Amino acid sequence: MNRTLLAILAALLAESISLVAESPATAISPREIPVEAFISPDDIGLCQLSPDGKHLAFATRLATGRIGVALMDLRTGALEPLFAAEDNDVNLLFWKGSDRIVFGTHAPDDWDALRSISLTSRKVVALSESDPITEWPTKHKIYVRVMDRLPTLPGKILVDGFVSKHSAVRKYQLMDVEDGSLHALEGENEPVDVTQVVASTGGQVMALVRSVDGKDVLQGWSNPALNFKNLAESQWGSPSWRLLGISGDNRTAYVVAETETGTNSLHTLNLETGEFGGPLLEVSDGAIKSLVQSRDHGKLLGVTIEGDKTRYHWFDPARARLQEQIDASLPGKWNEVIDASDDEALILIRSANDRDPGSYYILDDRAPRLMSIGKARSRIDPTLMCPMEPIHFKARDGLALQGYITRPRGHESSPAPLVVLPHPGPFEMRTSWGFDPTVQFLASRGYAVLQVNFRGSSGFGKAFEKAGWQQLGLKIQDDLADGVKWAIDNGIGDPGRVAIMGLSFGGYSAMMGLIRYPQVYRCAVNYWGQMDLTVDLWVTRVWSGHHRLEYFKTQFGENNDVLGSQSPIRLAEKINGPSLQIYLYPDFKPEFKPRYQMRDEIRLRMRERMQKAGKTFEEMVVIDEKLNEHWWTLQVDAHQRVERFLAKYLPAGN
């Protein structure tokens, strides 16, 4: 494929994509950008090259209004829809060979419904279904989760799922992507209490981590005649090993050793002998997140490291030089090679940063030339977005904290009304640098946004994580308030205009903020937050299994009196400030009752107690059996409600 033809094809694709998304407006202020530009699915996403380099598959909104699968022929520029989803959006897409695409559609709290389609026949094959967990296995359907795409194994993927339509037994199995048939693996393969797993290039599970009896146990498997053997173990919250992947020899695993202080190192693990190799890399200013390997896993090229921002460390000089060339062509961006043809002649790149939701490019290594494919969100003008700056400060007890501040245009050197945005979780999650639609939406309306990786957040060492255990309504809330103090002391936040909002644990923190720090926060937005911590233990037991419940108790605590003392529903009379309560439910059919009806019963009790105490609050409550179909419309409605609420109680001015 020559340069001229590739340039023509890139132009054709860019023109085609414009049919499903408007171009960004020019000469407008950020306040004029509609909510829909921020709160919407990507115009194009999940882009993947076929192994032979002849086609590009991607997800986009199609005629049904749902996110489906589209295809571009890179030889002719022809663009066509392959699968137009009816109910649920496509959220997973990858190639298995050059003639078949596997994709998944998703609904809230369900596993993906897997499908595959052949380019030759255009026939869609149902591989598995997506149904509520509480229906397993009564509907006589196959339910699976994709564990490994197995790019070098023709026609098969590794899945975790039920062994048949009539069985309640789950195992790791190989699934044939042409007909959905399941094939048993050798040895012990039940995913009981398993939190991490890596497989050979042939699909055999080779190493895993089980979470049992207060310990994480790393196990390896090297002989079909034997079960998994214990290789290492650690107490919950102590330094431990984390599996990242396996080499092409199928005998060497890559593991990360995590320490108390946050230093982590990459090691090899011989699955036959159980011996750990010396560190290949030690990192003290970030967490080693993932491997970059050759397509056949025969060569470890590098790793990604997440600190204030994500970066690469390269072991392979040639791959390092390629990255330098890409970064020089696309400066100021996080440039990620997301796919390549089998011969690596064509390389697919996603380029994004904190102000840019991303663009896709193809590098033709034979030319070489970098060609634009299209923008993830064409209505977002990066020049109107605001930088997300890493920050560091100390909590009142001396604990070092990290986070991000996003300042609105016009307030680069003057205080602005401030919105604190705690991340969900609170454990095993963190806020990361990059384009965040909600953050940029708030900044466009004149608000500075503070995001704190409070104690308990992941990626900062076991001691930091453990410092947040059983501190949900206590020291974690202190960390957020200390972040506000930092922002005010540094002239970023207006001390009289501070709000707190968030989803899940962020919503819980919003209400606890009004309870514990009414002098700090003027108002709060709670989006589906946990109002009664004692009930969340029960919900977790139903939905996550015994081992997860035990770990949950360790992190959250199990004394109901203590949990109740940190639950907003028990402290409603202490709420000081107006709040907006947002709850969206799919339905209250029997199969959803354990999760949704119980949550709504708590919401109603919370509502009653706030009314009785004379508290000011607004509500957006939606119960919709077609919630997934209406998801994006409801998200836009919710953000518009937030905009009006903040304008009322935390005006940003002009």
Image: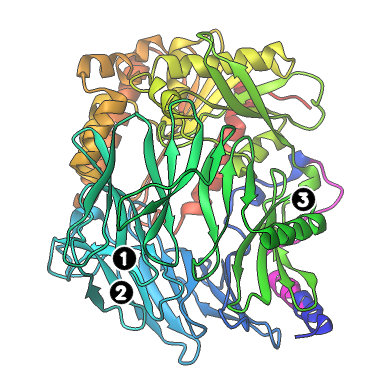
Where is residue 480 shown, x and y percent of the image? 53, 19
Where is residue 14 shown, x and y percent of the image? 74, 71
Where is residue 128 shown, x and y percent of the image? 30, 70
Task: Tell whether 434 sits left or right of 465.
Answer: right
Residue placed under numbered mark 1 in the picture: 159
The amino acid at mark 1 is Val
Q: Are marks 1 and 2 in contact (CB under 8 Å)?
A: yes
Placement of 518 over or under 331, stated as above or below: above
Q: Which residue is drawn at 83% across and 46% down?
A: 28
Residue placed under numbered mark 2 in the picture: 175
Which of the two residues, 49 or 407, is positioned nearer the viewer here?
A: 49
Q: How crowded is mark 2: few (under 14 residues within 10 Å), some or many (20 or more)?
A: many
Q: Is mark 1 on a helix, strand or loop?
A: strand
Q: Which residue is drawn at 44% across and 81% down?
A: 117
Q: What is the magenta range?
A: 12-29
Q: How crowded is mark 3: few (under 14 residues within 10 Å), some or many (20 or more)?
A: some
Q: Can residue 50 be seen in this view?
A: yes
Residue placed under numbered mark 3 in the picture: 381
Q: What element carries label 3?
A: loop
Q: Residue at x 75, y 74 (%)?
A: 15
